[in-house]
Amino acid sequence: DWIETADVIMAAVTRSRKSFPSRIVETRVPATELPVGGDPMLFEQVLFNILDNADKYAEPGTPTVVVAEARAERVIVTIEDEGRGIPAADLDRVFEKFTRLGSGDGRPAGTGLGLAIAKGVVEAMGGTIRAESPARAGRGTRITIALPVAEPSAAKFPAAEEEQALAGVALHSRR
Ligand code: ATP
Ligand code: MG
């Protein structure tokens, strides 16, 4: 099975626009296919968790930019905000369960699970996820997800004999 990255991005961005109507989210995705393997609902949740952070930890009015591209047998998705950023020492730690940076500065409450869930799902998809922030504090965060490119034709257009085999299984759903 495979899913089209651009479709999942648009679903997550649509959901984020409903949840945070005043946040500007820009998307840049190519017209070409970006097929990856995985569960579309889980992948959408990953992207939504990151968009949720971008909204929570960046000033009102600043944009979030989502870019997708194919590079060296990988589908690369980046989500970049112009928020407070993450200190260099904490860039890996934010993907651990229950990590919340700082305290008592009036940030909206969270459980510290959004990025841990994102990492779990991305790794189950065979990919990697990392966070970067420029050296100067408060100058934004970029989350980069890299996933193996799936072979789209394999799952979407089953070979004739494969299709016959599947047709013999009463409960099999073709999708
Ligand atoms: P939850 O997502 O479970 O509601 P949360 O947002 O606190 O809670 P994570 O999404 O896992 O948890 O993020 C962990 C921590 O990393 C956050 O509490 C915040 O301190 C920091 N963080 C995550 N994303 C950003 C970002 N875009 N800019 C600045 N800090 C961030
Ligand atoms: Mg979060």
Image (cartoon, helix red, strand yellow):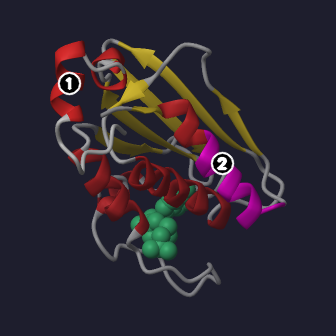
The image shows residue 17 at horizontal and vertical percentages of: 75, 56
Q: Please tell me whether residue 105 is drawn above or below residue 155 in the rendered image.
A: below
Look at discs 1 and 2 and give the one toward the viewer. 1
Number of marks in picture = 2
**117 left or right of 23 in image:** left
* Residue 13 image label: 2
Q: Quadrant of residue 46?
A: bottom left
Residue 139, visible in the rendered structure? no
Disc 1 to disc 2: CB gap under 8 Å:
no
The image shows residue 57 at horizontal and vertical percentages of: 62, 64
Q: Is mark 1 within 8 Å of ligand 1?
A: no
**126 left or right of 40 in image:** left
* Range covered by the magenta-colored residues: 10-21
Q: Identify the residue at horizontal 30%, vertical 23% (top origin).
A: 150
Q: Which amino acid does label 2 sit on?
A: Val
Q: Please tell me whether residue 2 is drawn above or below residue 140 in the rendered image.
A: above
Is tag 1's residue or tag 2's residue first in the polypeptide sequence? 2
Q: Is label 2 in a helix, a strand or a loop?
A: helix
Residue 31, visible in the rendered structure? yes
Q: Identify the residue at horizontal 57%, vertical 52% (top origin).
A: 137
Considering depth in this image, is 136 or 153 the residue closer to the camera?
153
Q: Is residue 17 magenta?
A: yes
Q: Name the residue under label 1.
A: 164
Q: Quadrant of the N terminus?
A: top left
Q: What residue type is labelled 1?
A: Gln
Residue farthest to the bottom, as pictured? 104
In space, the residues marked 1 and 2 are separated at their CA atoms by 38 Å
Predominant secondary structure, magenta span: helix
**97 left or right of 16 in image:** left
The image shows residue 124 at horizontal and vertical percentages of: 22, 48
Q: Is label 1 in a helix, a strand or a loop?
A: helix
